[in-house]
Image (cartoon, helix red, strand yellow):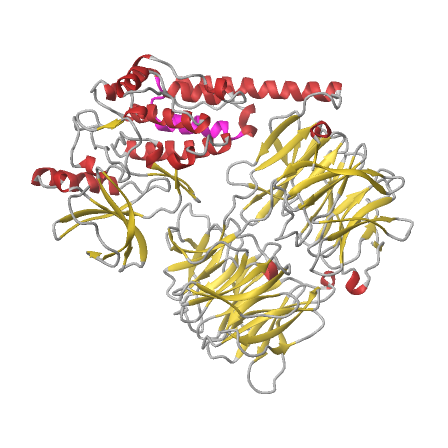
């Protein structure tokens, strides 16, 4: 303890206001505090009096603290400041929200993908420190915090700039963890936590970067097994184990551990520092390689003779998997044989998107790879180590195979397309808009062209589409996710009469027979041989016997897998990433991901959370910056409603009420009104513009109504004009246009931007003389600026794609999200000639964690008026990184 009275909430240390205590231990006390100058949360560590009383040591401490503060790295807890007031010396550190690795390990070992990810991040953080001449010396689970953005290494408490200085600095030791250490720790000439210390540290020898590599090996071992690498009943027995014994093989505790990973950890734990990895970067490279299964076909030369051994070990394991898969496809195992499960992982910072499909013979899978706002199709043979991208499938999604396995159908850029795998030729077959799935038989392709349309049919070689199913007013407003049955004439599809209730699965026919109801489900359904329907109830993937001749279900439902929630809260779209062919099954985890409103600074640093987790979209800051209006999906009635969050009070107020769904809120300049869209009944192609008092009182006032869908976009600062986006009711007939509505007088709404392209996300400049908006007129969605209202001057603002433009309050800067989801800014000059500059990244390497577009377009970010911080609608679940393949899945069926 510090020897001083604990600090009370509301007291101050310099410019820092104490909020609450976080922990205490032998090396100090830690408090959560607010930096009143920068309005951010920090962690304050009050140092013990006995280590700051020596002037020489205090001077050395300040010198070493400056060195540590230079470690700017996404996986290192930042040291912001040091200070002294009223006899209290303290450190100011980054405030982290998350769980310590020690607390996480109390629940058991981590999944291998998390071990590889966090391990590589820690190795990268250590490498950064080592390159600055700083050795951590006390790496342990208690000094690692797992946050939403990854692992954070903290408390370089025993760190020393000691690659040039021998011995231990007692003042540097003041920066050790504030919480009480785990058992078997000691202080003195041997500094650190015994279970994670290298042999040379225990023997009092000089510690260098390789000592941290040993400690990292101990942490990796514990993450993978849930057990410490070296254990004992006393300090002496633990020290003896570290010096003389080898830990139990990881594979003896976790049998499915890859040999390559075991080799990485074993090399970290070599007794002789010369036999270990010689740098943390070597460890990082090895772990990143192991996390990329597609990389196994090419062995790349890297620094260090031991890394090549990792390539060999990993390559051998991968070749064994390929041999197993090849043997499987040659002999076709029976139901009684063992089930094979494996994952296909997305590469790098890519993720998997909407749709995956197994080829008819079950030997290949097509996946959607997303990176930022762009996507492409990948094809992977299940007995190969790598996927290959398909040229010409930019922004493709929801793929499906031709019955001969030679072509793949998909949707992209408002078209139904197909690609021939042999030649790579791509052909557009029909117009669509926000399609909802397709299926291919010998006869041709059956597909859902829009979210609120009947199913259509077209020949696989092209031609004129033909309507196949009939909507029935409010009883049936959407037909989606068709799936041909084995005869190629009958097909499954999902139908919904309103937003309320589950989806209904029907069997239709190309012969126009009356549809046959099969069941209710929370998703669409697919057919799997020899005779099952696969569908989701809640978050459970179920199978039930189904006779494709009698069109009847039989027997009980059986559980296939857990955690497959259909896209959209409570199955709002009915879509699931699910495919089956022969006796092979493929699926992704849940597409659902809640979000949280979070404040980031211009450098990409998380400042604070502005809300609890929820299913949010389209945040809109009030003019005074004290509130945010947001769409919020409500599970109870399966629809969106508009709410207002008061930042100061932390309260949500419901603004929109009544039947239907509402969204896309826009503030009036005085902050008294909210304009938003309201659906007409359950028709999600028909929205009218309304306004409501921002405090939720009074009645709605209809501002504009027509035959299509209309969504507010912005109100001019003088309150004279409302910009909104209009969609034709038949979406395939035209694109989105930007309209203006005068808010005073008798003038009527009229189109402002009207073309064959889609124009949307329009926002006024502060002076009202310019409008920034997005358009796909060039083929890619870009940000443009046009003069208002004459449209005489127009220029393109973004260069490599962009969306969601925002103006700074003085009109001198515009921000937008690039296709890679990285925030960019462009300097402009208010007046007759804005003369835009070149787009600049706000922060190198920062990818905004925005939630995927939701209802009405999905605005994901909003800049504060001064441009110093950004409100991000941040996703709170990882994007899809793995596709699960299950061979002989029928053998694993269990009763519900």
- Magenta range is 276-292
Above or below for 656 versus 289: below
Where on the picture, by quarter, is residue 179? top left
Residue 204 placement (x, y as % from top left): 20, 20
Residue 853 placement (x, y as % from top left): 57, 55
Identify the residue at horizontal 76%, vertical 42% (top origin): 526
Quarter the N terminus occupies: top left
Residue sitting farthest toward the left = 55
Left or right: where 546 falls relative to 162: right
Residue 83 placement (x, y as % from top left): 18, 49
Front one among 752 and 469: 469
Q: Main secondary structure of the magenta part?
A: helix
Where on the picture, by quarter, is residue 241? top left
Residue 249 placement (x, y as % from top left): 45, 17
Front one among 714 and 478: 478
- Magenta run includes residue 281: yes
Quarter the C terminus occupies: top right
- Magenta run includes residue 358: no
**Res 424 visible:** no
Left or right: where 151 falls relative to 58: right
Front one among 201 and 28: 28
**Res 451 visible:** yes
Residue sitting farthest toward the front = 233
């Amino acid at each position: 303890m510090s020897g001083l009275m604990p600090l009370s909430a509301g007291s101050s240390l310099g410019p820092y206001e104490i909020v609450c205590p976080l922990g205490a231990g032998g090396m100090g006390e830690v408090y959560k505090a607010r930096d009143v100058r920068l309005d951010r949360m920090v962690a304050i560590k009050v140092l013990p009096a006995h280590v700051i009383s020596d002037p020489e040591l205090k001077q050395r401490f300040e010198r070493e603290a400056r060195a540590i503060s230079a470690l700017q790295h996404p996986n290192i807890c930042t040291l912001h400041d040091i200070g002294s007031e009223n006899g209290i010396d303290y450190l100011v550190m980054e405030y982290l929200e998350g769980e310590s690795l020690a607390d996480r390990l109390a629940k058991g070992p981590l999944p291998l993908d998390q071990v590889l990810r966090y391990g590589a991040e820690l190795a990268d953080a250590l490498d950064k420190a080592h390159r600055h001449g700083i050795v951590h010396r006390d790496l342990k689970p208690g000094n690692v915090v797992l946050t939403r953005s990854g692992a954070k290494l903290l408390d370089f408490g025993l760190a020393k700039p000691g690659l040039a200085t021998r011995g231990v600095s007692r003042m540097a030791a003041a920066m050790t963890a504030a919480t009480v250490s785990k058992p078997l720790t000691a202080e003195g000439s041997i500094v650190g936590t015994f279970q994670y210390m290298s042999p040379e540290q225990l023997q009092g020898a000089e510690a260098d970067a390789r000592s941290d590599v040993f400690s990292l090996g101990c942490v990796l071992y514990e993450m993978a097994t849930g057990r410490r690498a070296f254990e004992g009943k006393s300090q002496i027995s633990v020290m003896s184990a570290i010096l003389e014994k080898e830990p139990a093989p990881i594979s003896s505790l976790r049998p499915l551990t890859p040999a390559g990973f075991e080799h990485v950890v074993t090399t970290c734990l070599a007794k002789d520092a010369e036999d270990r990895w010689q740098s943390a970067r070597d460890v990082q490279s090895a772990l990143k390689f192991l996390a990329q299964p597609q990389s196994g076909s090419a062995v790349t030369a890297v620094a260090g003779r031991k890394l090549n051994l990792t390539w060999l070990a990993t390559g051998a394991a991968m070749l064994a998997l390929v041999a197993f898969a090849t043997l499987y496809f040659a002999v076709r195992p029976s139901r009684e044989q063992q089930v094979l499960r494996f994952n296909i992982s997305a590469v790098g910072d890519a993720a998997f998107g909407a749709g995956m499909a197994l080829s008819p013979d079950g030997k290949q899978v097509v996946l959607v790879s997303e990176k930022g706002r762009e996507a492409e199709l990948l094809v992977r043979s299940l007995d190969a180590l790598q996927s290959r991208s398909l040229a010409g499938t930019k922004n493709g999604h929801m793929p499906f195979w031709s019955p001969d396995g030679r072509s793949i159908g998909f949707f992209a850029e408002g078209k139904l397309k197909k690609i021939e795998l042999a030649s790579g030729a791509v052909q557009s077959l029909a117009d669509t808009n926000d399609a909802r799935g397709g299926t291919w038989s010998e006869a041709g392709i059956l597909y859902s062209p829009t979210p609120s349309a009947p199913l259509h049919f077209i020949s696989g070689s092209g031609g004129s589409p033909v309507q196949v199913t009939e909507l029935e007013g409010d009883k049936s407003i959407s037909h989606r996710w068709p799936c041909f049955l084995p005869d190629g004439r009958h097909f499954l599809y999902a139908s919904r009469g309103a937003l309320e209730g589950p989806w209904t699965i029907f069997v239709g026919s190309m012969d126009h027979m009356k549809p046959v109801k099969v069941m209710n489900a929370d998703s669409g359904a697919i057919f799997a041989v020899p005779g099952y329907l696969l569908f989701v109830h809640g978050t459970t993937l179920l199978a039930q016997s189904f006779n494709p001749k009698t069109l009847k279900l039989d027997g009980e439902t059986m559980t296939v897998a857990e955690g497959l929630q259909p896209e959209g809260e409570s199955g709002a779209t009915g879509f699931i990433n699910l495919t089956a062919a022969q006796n092979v099954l493929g699926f992704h985890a849940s597409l659902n991901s809640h979000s949280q409103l979070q404040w980031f600074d211009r450098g990409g640093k998380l400042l604070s959370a502005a809300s609890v987790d929820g299913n949010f979209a389209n945040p809109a800051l009030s003019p005074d910056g004290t509130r945010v209006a947001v769409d919020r999906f409500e599970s109870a009635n399966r629809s969106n409603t508009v709410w207002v969050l008061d930042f100061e009070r932390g309260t949500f107020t419901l603004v929109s009420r009544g039947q239907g769904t509402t969204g896309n809120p826009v503030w009036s300049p005085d902050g008294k009104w909210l304009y938003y869209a309201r659906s007409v009944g359950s028709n999600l192609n028909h929205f009218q513009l309304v306004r409501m008092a921002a405090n939720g009182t009074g009645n709605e006032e209809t501002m504009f109504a027509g035959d299509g869908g209309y969504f507010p976009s912005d109100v001019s600062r003088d309150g004279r004009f409302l910009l909104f986006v209009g969609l034709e009711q038949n979406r395939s007939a035209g694109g989105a246009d930007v309209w203006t509505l005068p808010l005073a007088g008798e003038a009527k709404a009229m189109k402002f931007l009207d073309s064959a392209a889609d124009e949307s996300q329009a926002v006024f400049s502060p002076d009202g003389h310019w409008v920034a908006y997005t358009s796909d007129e060039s083929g890619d969605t870009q940000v443009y600026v046009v003069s208002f209202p004459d449209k005489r001057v127009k220029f393109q603002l973004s260069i490599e794609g962009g969306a969601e433009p925002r103006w700074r309050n003085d009109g001198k800067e515009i921000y937008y999200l690039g296709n890679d989801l990285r925030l960019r800014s462009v300097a402009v000059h208010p007046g007759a000639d804005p003369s835009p500059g070149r787009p600049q990244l706000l922060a190198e390497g920062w990818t905004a964690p925005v939630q995927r577009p939701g209802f009405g377009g999905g605005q994901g970010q909003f800049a504060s008026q001064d441009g110093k911080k950004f409100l991000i609608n941040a996703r709170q679940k990882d994007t899809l990184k793995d596709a699960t393949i299950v061979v002989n899945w029928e053998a694993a069926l269990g009763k519900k």
